[in-house]
């Protein structure tokens, strides 16, 4: 059995190399978190679409950069754990990148890892949880870059 990671990319915004690098980042992060043979999806969408999800599922009527929907159930066809789904608002990520003096690729990489941690039941709703998540996501990104090179 192997990992089944579905990406739904707007073709015009990501090169084949970008898509492959994001896949490597997901594989690396899941491996480091001892999550073997998971299934999950990552979808890129607009701020309007993610705002609708945020309102519907979290009761928060505003945009966000990333939202995760944890499943934790097994896929009966494969026996693999279905972690859940991550939605990333590309336009919000782009604005965040400018605000935080990062490239869009760096910001999306951070959001992917952040979303994975949410799927693995990490929470940033408290100060302690937030600090733990930020430290862990930064470590995963730094270690990934040490092996695979700088995320540009």
Image: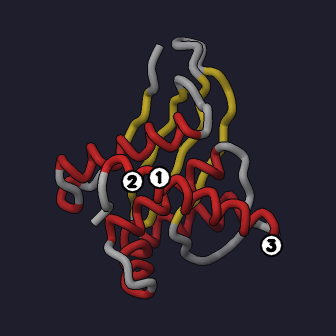
Residue 77: give x, y in percent of width and height: 53, 12
Provide the secondary structure element on which disc 2 rests.
helix
Q: Residues within 10 Å of mark 1 (few under 14, many from 20)?
A: some
**Residue at 55% over, 72% down:** 64
Kindly indicate the quadrant of the structure image that contains residue 85. top right
Give the spatial CA distance, label 3 vs label 1. 24 Å
Give the spatial CA distance, label 3 vs label 2. 28 Å
Q: Are marks 2 and 1 in contact (CB under 8 Å)?
A: yes
Kindly indicate the quadrant of the structure image that contains residue 82. top right
13, above or below 4, in the image: below
- Disc marking residue 17: none
Provide the secondary structure element on which disc 3 rests.
helix
Kindly indicate the quadrant of the structure image that contains residue 26. top left
**Residue at 62% over, 65% down:** 54
Quadrant where the C terminus is found in the figure: bottom left
Return the residue at label 1: 143
**6 or 52: nearer the eye?**
6
Provide the secondary structure element on which disc 1 rests.
helix
Whichever of labels 3 and 2 marks the residue nearer the N terminus, that label is 3
Whichever of labels 3 and 1 marks the residue nearer the N terminus, that label is 3
Give the spatial CA distance, label 2 vs label 1. 5 Å
85, above or below 110, in the image: above
Question: Is label 3 or label 2 in front?
Answer: 2
Residue 107: give x, y in percent of width and height: 41, 68
Return the residue at label 2: 146
**100 or 32: nearer the eye?**
32
- Tell me if 75 is positioned left or right of 131 in this view: left
Question: Is label 3 or label 1 in front?
Answer: 1
Return the residue at label 3: 127
Residue 138: give x, y in percent of width and height: 55, 62
- Tell me if 139 is positioned left or right of 118 in this view: left
């Amino acid at each position: 059995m192997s990992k089944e990671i579905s990406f739904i990319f707007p073709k015009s915004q990501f090169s084949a190399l970008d898509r492959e690098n994001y896949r490597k980042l997901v594989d690396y992060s899941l491996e480091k978190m001892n999550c073997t043979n998971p299934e999950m999806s990552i979808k890129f969408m607009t701020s309007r679409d993610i705002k609708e999800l945020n309102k519907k599922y979290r009761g928060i009527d505003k945009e966000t950069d990333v939202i995760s929907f944890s499943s934790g159930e097994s896929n009966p066809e494969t026996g693999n754990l279905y972690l859940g789904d991550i939605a990333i608002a590309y336009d919000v990520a782009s604005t965040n990148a400018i605000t935080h003096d990062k490239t869009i690729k760096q910001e999306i990489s951070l959001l992917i890892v952040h979303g994975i941690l949410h799927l693995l039941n990490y929470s940033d709703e408290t100060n302690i949880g937030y600090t733990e998540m930020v430290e862990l996501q930064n470590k995963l990104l730094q270690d990934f870059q040490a092996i695979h090179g700088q995320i540009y």
